[in-house]
Image (cartoon, rainbow, N blue to C red):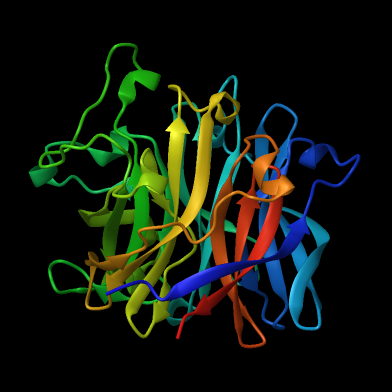
Amino acid sequence: MTVPYALTRVGVMMTPEPGNELEAEGVLNPATGHTPDGQLYLLPRLVATGNVSRVGLAAVELKDGVPVGVRREGVVLAPDEGWERGLNNAGVEDPRVTWIPSLNTHVMTYVAYGPLGPKPALAVSHDLRNWERLGPLHFEYQAALDTDLNLFPNKDTVFFPEPVTDPDGEPSYAMLHRPMWDLGWFREGEGVHLPAGVTDDRPGIWVSFVPVADVERDVRNLVHLRNHRLVAMSEYPFEELKIGAGPAPLRVPEGWLVIHHGVTGEQPQGFDPTTQKVSYAAGALLLDASDVTRVLARSTEPLLVPETEEERVGTVGNVVFPTAIEVVEGVRYVFYGMADAAIGVARLDRLT
């Protein structure tokens, strides 16, 4: 099976507003969602001087049914909690928002850049404006992995929009994520610690689950994840360094479509993106609808690579970083970060 989908550039959606201190170092990697009145919004990552990130809210403006720009409406999440700030860093970064109809809730996963580096966290909302933090994610201990996933920095977390079946056959909400195994960033000389059964130290896409019954009892249980499984590792040249999930998985006739990013190049140790000499491209996976741990097909070539000026030149050059998919007047659009500085939009088409 092939992945019968393609991305076609539409244009630039959002660039930093001159004179706006909160956007001095870029606007990028947006989440999206619809308010109850049907208005489509971006929730962009806004980066202030000193690499301090917040999550903004911006109404999407359309021209002839096509997203072309935004109208800013302020900040909805800032690094106000102690665990979202270190002595020399702070941020709530790279939000992904999934509308889960069965919960009647927008679920935002984001990266809290706190004292121990990037850790995944969760917040929920009914209107995209008011967000309730449910706190850092917790990965239940799984003896077969011979490690504690909570030890590791983790990014690219995003929930599926509807329940799926977990490895125990139980209806569950599922979340993709990307642990990073090198603990040298935290403790000098500690190096890489791989889970049992994993032989490749490159960051790949994992999935974890939480039973529907637990969430129905208390939505705060969304942070308590279990049944961790490796889904996909890098396989092709455009993703040689690492891969990570992008927008919430999209249900399509073939299964679940996961638009992901693949990275090539040179990435020094640490989390300063400006030291990286890398290229980020967009790829795609198809997961089995009845078993989301199973990859049915994947793109051997990227769907989108950095080519335009906005994608090649910015805070981190040569980056297209897909983070959201929305349907506008029957057409699917993917919103993506451009060179860690601006936000673009591309049309997602199914090939016949």
**In terms of image quadrants, where is residue 162?**
bottom left
Q: Residue furthest right?
A: 19
Q: Quadrant of the N terminus?
A: bottom left
Towards the viewer: 209 or 304: 304
**In terms of image quadrants, where is residue 22?**
top right
Q: Height in image: 196 above or below 102?
A: above
Q: Quadrant of the C terminus?
A: bottom left
Q: Height in image: 155 above or below 104?
A: above
Towards the viewer: 237 or 267: 237
Is 99 left or right of 173, judged from the image as shown?
A: right
Is 218 left or right of 193, judged from the image as shown?
A: right
Residue at image position (80%, 65%) is 69
**In terms of image quadrants, where is residue 269?**
top left
Is 77 left or right of 262, judged from the image as shown?
A: right
Towards the viewer: 160 or 107: 160
* Residue 186 pos. (x, y %): 38, 20
Residue at image position (70%, 74%) is 40
Residue at image position (13%, 42%) is 145
Is 202 left or right of 260, judged from the image as shown?
A: left
* Residue 235 pos. (x, y %): 28, 49
* Residue 205 pos. (x, y %): 32, 51
The reply to whether residue 186 is in sight is no
The reply to whether residue 237 is in sight is yes
